Amino acid sequence: MKLKKRKLKYSAIFFLCWFAFMVLLVDGIISFKACVDFFGSYALTEITLLLLVILPTLAVYTFTKEHEPKSEGDNDTEA
């Protein structure tokens, strides 16, 4: 599978913004200890937070459309 530059760029931008938002949310607004108490285990909390970052990033990569460059000579006949 060949990676597309545009899709990768948008996914990376989304990942950085979403990761920063999740860090602010978990470390600043909601304490990590409160999340652990809610889920019941440290491992489940970590896995859930990782999936909340990775899965939307994969969705952005999947649903981003790659533009095909238009060439002036659509015919591939060379002299």
Image: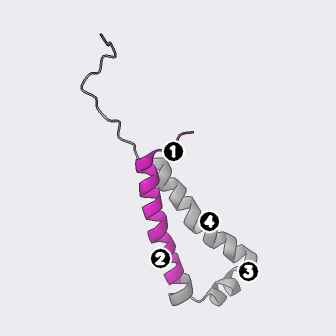
Which amino acid is tagged 1?
Answer: Leu
Q: Is residue 45 left or right of residue 58?
A: right
The label number, if any, that marks residue 3 in the structure image: 1
Circles 2 and 4: CB atoms closer than 8 Å: no
Is 56 located above or below residue 47 in the figure? above
Which amino acid is tagged 3?
Answer: Tyr
Q: Which residue is mark 4?
A: 51
Few, some or many C-alpha atoms within 10 Å of disc 4 (few <14, some 14-19, many ≥20)?
few
Is 1 located above or below residue 75 in the figure? below
Range of residues picked out in magenta: 1-25
Question: What is the distance, in whole Å, between disc 2 and disc 4 at their CAs?
Answer: 14 Å
The label number, if any, that marks residue 42 in the structure image: 3
Nearer-the-camera pick, 61 or 69: 69
Viewer-nearest of labels 3 and 1?
1
Dot 1: element: loop
Q: Earlier in the sequence, mark 3 or mark 4?
A: 3
**Residue at screen point 41% across, 56% down:** 10
Residue 46 in picture, x, y percent from top left: 68, 75
Residue 47 in picture, x, y percent from top left: 68, 70
Question: What is the distance, in whole Å, between disc 3 and disc 4 at their CAs?
Answer: 14 Å
Q: Point out the image quarter for the C terminus.
A: top left
Question: What is the distance, in whole Å, between disc 3 and disc 1 at their CAs?
Answer: 34 Å
Few, some or many C-alpha atoms within 10 Å of disc 3 (few <14, some 14-19, many ≥20)?
some
Residue 72 in picture, x, y percent from top left: 24, 26
Dot 4: element: helix
The label number, if any, that marks residue 21 in the structure image: 2
Q: Earlier in the sequence, mark 2 or mark 3?
A: 2
